[in-house]
Image (cartoon, helix red, strand yellow):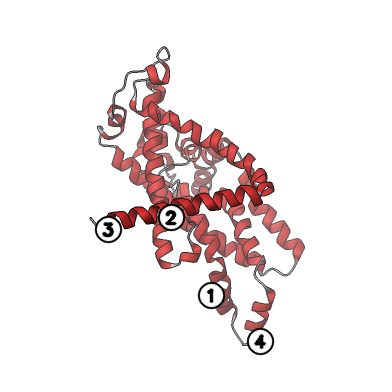
Amino acid sequence: MANIPAAQGKNTLKRRRIMSDLRYDLKHNKTLLLMVFPSILYLFVLSYLPMVGIYYAFTNYNYQGGLFGSPFVGLANFKFLFASGTAWKLTFNTVFYNLIFIFGGTALRIAIAIMLSEIIGNIFRKVTQTIIFLPHFVSMVLVGVFAYNLMNYETGLLNNIITSLGGERFDFYGTPWIWRLIIPAVEFWKSTGYGTIIYLAAILGISEEIYEAAIIDGVTFMQKIRYITLPSLKPTFTILLLMSLGGIIRGQFDLFYQLIGNNGLLFGTTDIIDTYVYRVLRVSPNIGMGSAVGLYQSVIGALMVLGSNYLIRKLEPENALF
């Protein structure tokens, strides 16, 4: 019991220190605070105020009662996702593809960024960078059309090439396992160019004096990458990884829906939470159910970010977000 007053005294001192720092900032950093105020207001209005809508997930929403006038149903809205037994399969598919997108895509972006940084000719580098960046601007609707015309069983370009070489047609849209390869390939093709720019900027920011000193010491090309380039990219990689893990339970709806559509034969290997919820709510629209799924995804994503940041802070505190 004797420790309680001491603990209370520490808390009091801590509060006084915080208030003192706040008064100091208000007095001496008015200009900086005014500059950051629009960003704070933006986050408050568009990020924090809408969080009141979390309550939708626990109501049987109707338009007459509104948000707080609708009947409270507790966790009933979460049951439609878990009661059918598909929740774990959907979660597995979502996490599985996102892990491939994150780690496979990151490895590809770093590799391409290193290769671009080693190109001597600026014109060739810029042309190459522009070409790999262009797919980022292609609509996923067009990507879906291209994919269908490539892989259609009867008239697809790939099947026509296969038959012209004497082979048999391959049913892409009736073979579930092949889409575990096709979907990541399409994602890499579309997003690698945009992600490469970030790593290329980080590489170009490395001091040339470090490379020159390493060359004088007689390092090889691969040693230069291993001991200079990759360690220098670690902070950038860590930040992007933590940001990506926040959305690991959120699938890319446009990518999966435009490539797969409503093909039930492929749902076993391609169905993710977002596409499943879309199909269910299209038949029976329910704001509460949609909010429940969004809350489930957000909570898991927040836990992933906090857990990953905790591990990084333990291993390498200077690379942690907070």
Q: Residue at (43%, 45%) from the top-left corner?
A: 170
Residue that numbered label 1 is attached to: 226
Report how far apart the C-alphas of labels 1 and 3 lie in the structure.
52 Å
Is disc 2 in contact with disc 4, using a CB cutoff of under 8 Å? no
Of the residues shown, which amino acid type is indicated by label 4? Answer: Ile
Could you classify mark 2 by the number of other residues whose Cα lies within 10 Å: few (under 14), some (14-19), or many (20 or more)? few
Q: Residue at x 67, y 45 (%)?
A: 35
Q: Residue shown at 45%/67% (left/top)?
A: 316
Residue 216 has which mark?
A: 4
Q: In what element is the residue under mark 4?
A: helix
Q: Quadrant of residue 36?
A: top right
User: Disc 2 vs disc 4: which is toward the camera?
Assistant: 2
Residue type highlighted by circle 2? Leu
Of circles 1 and 3, the one toward us is 3
Name the residue at the right extreme: 123
User: What's the residue type where badge 3 is placed?
Assistant: Asn
Q: Looking at the image, do the residues carrying marks 1 and 3 touch, with CB atoms under 8 Å apart? A: no
Q: Nearer the viewer, residue 199 or 25?
A: 25
Where 162 sits versus 75, above or below? below
- Real-space Cα separation, disc 1 to disc 4, in angstroms: 17 Å
Residue assigned mark 3: 3
Q: Position of residue 103 (x, y in %)?
A: 46, 58
Q: Earlier in the sequence, mark 3 or mark 2?
A: 3
Q: Secondary structure at mark 1?
A: helix
Residue 189 visible, this orientation: no
Mark 1 residue crowding within 10 angstroms, few (<14) / some (14–19) / many (20+)? few
Describe the element under mark 2 as helix, strand or loop. helix
Which amino acid type is marked by label 1? Arg
Nearer-N-terminus badge (1/4) = 4
Residue 241 position, x and y percent, is 48, 56
Marks 3/2: CA–CA distance = 15 Å
